[in-house]
Amino acid sequence: MTEPLPDVRTFRLSPEVVAPLRERLRHIALQTIYAITAEVPAYADPFAGELGPKIERAVMAALGTFLQLVSRAEGPDPQSPLGPALEGAYALGRGEARNGRSLDALLAAYRVGARVSWHEMAAITLGTGQPAANIAHFAELVFAYIDQLSAASVAGHADELASSGRARLRHLEQLTQALLAGEPEHTLVAAARRADWSPPRTLTAVLVPEHTARTVIDLLDRRTLELNEAGPGAPDFAVLLVPDASREALLGLLRGQVAVVGPARPWLAAKASYDRAVRTLRMPGRTVRTVIDTEDHLVELVLTADSQALADLRARVLAPLADAPEDSAAKLVDTLRSWLRHQGRREEVATELFVHPQTVRYRMTRLRQLYGDRLTDPEWISALTIALSAPSEFAV
């Protein structure tokens, strides 16, 4: 099992060991920078550009801090130089995360820096005639120091990713809410920019039960927006806004899931897709047990757009049957509906209703007596067709 590195704060080097290292500090820093530039390509451009002098000073400061740390007098020191050094390394890790870079290059630079700085320091220390025990002890201190700086950078990188991730999730949620609320274009564009979200051509609203949302979203485009609570119109449902979805492919991906799939709409008009999905979910008698494609229910959606108007229309067109006995009226309504659907073809009406054609003839004679010429009036025929095509839940 590998022995843990020593805590650099617990070791001291004599002034005789440290003095020649201070004199050659810039040389050590330059050799370290040259090695990092050669061995870590990601840092070649920053070192060669305008940041070069700043990086050189930062490396010298890190090495100077190390020498200051290991040459302090014994005893507690509340002003330990390690604190600022660790803060700087932590900030460096956060900066790498903010710039979208992984820690691979930074940790590689630390490794190269530790190796080269140790090599240079060891050569200088050997030149002063220090015994091998001091050199070995010195190596432990160098690598312990770099190890602590690396750990601080790792923590900074992780904290920045967590912080920026939470902030982006909030921005994405705010964007989704704005889309579903139908906010103006300038508001939506600004919200998308804040969320670092590239707008697609279209968005398709998908309603799924809240407890399955995470499973379903893993099947979809990674740019899919999510809102856990779809709103009062769809309690216990989450809404997903899927970008640039092929309808056939989307329905295939959702096979086996419980979902309501709205139409694809331009991304700025995503509310229209959401509204249609919610209306389909709320249609009377609707129980969602599988994937429901709103495109399969356009007639019902049109007919139920204004349920009160539909009820009034049915009441008006069925008024001639008001005085007929209830059972008789129901049979006449069924016959009239089938007659309209089959355009008066008696045999087909009889087959659909499981009655004799003569029965159809008798009922139609009765209906003509009740409606008179209105059964030949195109406007009345249209009104009857619409009223009798609506779902039975809207019957009056």
Image (cartoon, rainbow, N blue to C red):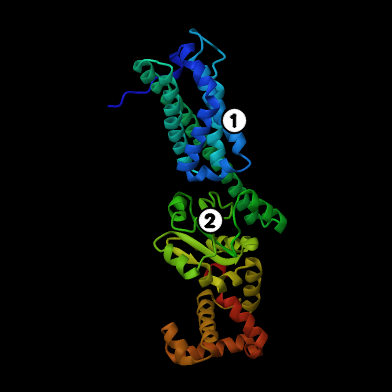
Q: Residue at x 45, y 14 (%)?
A: 13
Report the amino acid beneath label 2.
Arg
- Mark 2 and mark 1 lie on one chain; the one further toward the N terminus is 1
Which numbered disc, 2 or 1, marks the residue closer to the eye? 1
Question: Whole-percent x and y of residue 394?
Answer: 57, 68
Q: Using the rendered image of the protein, determine whether residue 284 is visible from the camera's viewpoint.
A: no
Q: Eyeballing the image, is 96 above or below 322?
A: above
- Quarter of the figure that contains the C terminus: bottom right
Q: Eyeballing the image, is 74 above or below 287?
A: above
- Out of 267 and 77, give the one closest to the viewer: 77
> Residue tagged by mark 1?
57
- Quarter of the figure that contains the N terminus: top left
Q: Residue at x 61, y 34 (%)?
A: 54
- Out of 167 and 123, give the one closest to the viewer: 123
> Residue tagged by mark 2?
223
In the image: residue 360, left or right of residue 380 = left
Q: Residue at x 63, y 56 (%)?
A: 179
Q: Residue at x 38, y 18 (%)?
A: 137
Question: Whole-percent x and y of residue 290?
Answer: 43, 62
Question: Whole-percent x and y of residue 340?
Answer: 55, 85
Q: Eyeballing the image, is 311 above or below 4?
A: below
Q: Circles 2 and 1: CB distance less than 8 Å?
A: no
